[in-house]
Image (tube, rainbow, N blue to C red):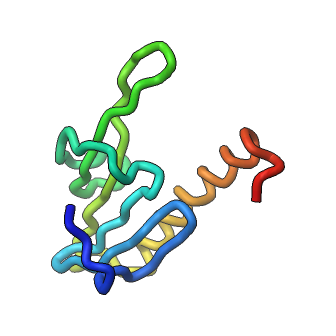
Amino acid sequence: MQIDPSDLAKRGRFYFIYDRPPHLVMEDKTKRGLEVREHVTDEKYDVEADRGMIHDMDGIGHKVGIRWYFPKSQYTLEQVVEKAEEMEKRYKAIREMTCPDDD
């Protein structure tokens, strides 16, 4: 996905939100550069999403969300930011558990 920096509507430590009419696009920064394997309807948010594949230490593949496309006709920027902040909170908790001395 080609992103124009002027499309950036909001950024967090672990996410970007882009204003790309007709969508607000929430992107997980930790998944940037991951190859998009499929474009599907996400079960959690019930919106279109790009998903990729990551593999664990046992070589088992797991499908993960990269980007979510929230229709501007149904979602405000504030609603998308709320979902992004939930994701941010999960990543901060993981970071505190795995890297307690990092800032």
Residue 22 % position (x, y): 16, 77
Find residue 61 and report its image quarter: top left
Quadrant, the C terminus: bottom right
* Residue 83 sits above or below residue 77 on the image: above
Q: Residue furthest bottom?
A: 6
In front: 10, or 76? Answer: 10
Q: How many marks?
A: 0
Q: Residue furthest right?
A: 101
Q: Which residue is located at x 25 percent, y 57 percent?
A: 47
Find residue 78 and report its image quarter: bottom left
Residue 75 % position (x, y): 32, 75
Left or right: residue 36 versus residue 86 is left
* Residue 63 sits above or below residue 67 on the image: above
Q: Which residue is located at x 23 percent, y 45 percent?
A: 36
In front: 100, or 47? Answer: 100
Left or right: residue 39 versus residue 92 is left
Quadrant, the N terminus: bottom left
Q: Which residue is located at x 22 percent, y 77 percent?
A: 20
Q: Which residue is located at x 17 percent, y 47 percent?
A: 39
Left or right: residue 28 versus residue 74 is right
Residue 56 % position (x, y): 47, 23
Residue 89 % position (x, y): 62, 58
In front: 86, or 64? Answer: 64
